[in-house]
Amino acid sequence: MKTLRKIIRWFLAIFFASTILSVVAYRFIPVWFTPLMFIRCTQQLSEGKELKLSHHWVSMDYISPSMPVAVIASEDANFLKHHGFDYKAIEHAAKRNLEHPEKKKLGASTISQQTAKNVFLWPGRSWVRKGFEVYFTTLIELLWSKQRIMEVYLNSIEMGDGIYGVDAVAAEHFQTDAKHLSREQCALIAATLPNPRKFSSKHPSDYMLKRQSRILKEMKFVPAFPK
């Protein structure tokens, strides 16, 4: 029993030390690869598809100022105000899911939570993964600035099949770079984020164009993102 407690203490010490150090490191260095990128590559190979991984890290200085405004309007209106979790959105989603169980589950993940999931975790809906998400979200909110969270988010999020980050999708879908994306293009990219493998910013459906129009209207009420 004494040995078991010692092993558990060592395991916890190594876990906390390694995770905190990794979060501190990513405060300063680019996130070149994420677990999801490796998972998608494995899926492509297992399905006999051509291997594709398009990802270009760029700093916020080389991203259109409309892009963070678009994702805030689309994904997380209170991003600059909350500390990682939007409790009102969580309450609203929980109430709606209970009242309408037949409908698709409504999520309430913030940009901070999505960043934690993208960079440190694997996709899924288990309680274990959710617990780790809460842990890493708390860490990045404590150790990173909002600007850094947004920078990592815009560089690591999946934006198409084998496409990760805003600069890659700008090149693949609009033949430009992240810095020169128009306001309309940014809104269209943001419109895909609920499911970027299903919804395409390159060949948008009528539904996507309606989402783009709604996001453009909401962007008018989002202040310029601070640098």
Image (cartoon, rainbow, N blue to C red):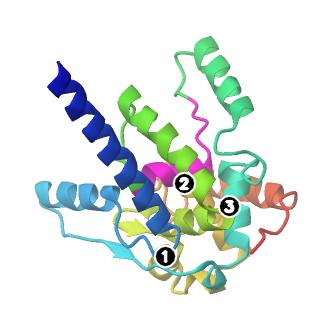
Label 2, label 3: how far apart the Cα atoms are: 20 Å
Q: In percent of the image, x 69 and y 45: which residue is there?
A: 83
Give the x, y percent position of residue 209: 65, 58
129 relative to 190 in the view: left or right: left
Residue 37 part of the magenta-drawn span: no
Mark 1, residue position: 173
Mark 2, residue position: 193
Label 1, label 2: how far apart the Cα atoms are: 15 Å
Look at the numbered disc 3 and give the secondary structure of its residue.
helix
Q: In percent of the image, x 14 and y 54: which residue is there?
A: 47
In front of the other: 213 or 167: 167
Q: Amino acid at mark 2?
A: Leu
21 relative to 66 in the view: left or right: left
Look at the numbered disc 1 and give the secondary structure of its residue.
helix
Foreground disc of the pair 1, 2: 2
Mark 3, residue position: 146
Q: Quadrant of residue 109?
A: top right
Q: Could you tell me what secondary structure mostly forms the magenta stretch? A: helix
Q: Quadrant of residue 185?
A: bottom right
Q: Residue furthest top?
A: 99
Q: Which residues are magenta?
A: 106-119
Give the x, y percent position of residue 41: 23, 62
In the rendered image, the vertical position of residue 36 relative to residue 188, given as above or below:
above
- Marks 2/3 in contact by CB < 8 Å: the verdict is no
Q: Earlier in the sequence, mark 1 or mark 2?
A: 1
Q: Amino acid at mark 3?
A: Lys
Q: Earlier in the sequence, mark 1 or mark 3?
A: 3
Q: Quadrant of the C terminus?
A: bottom right
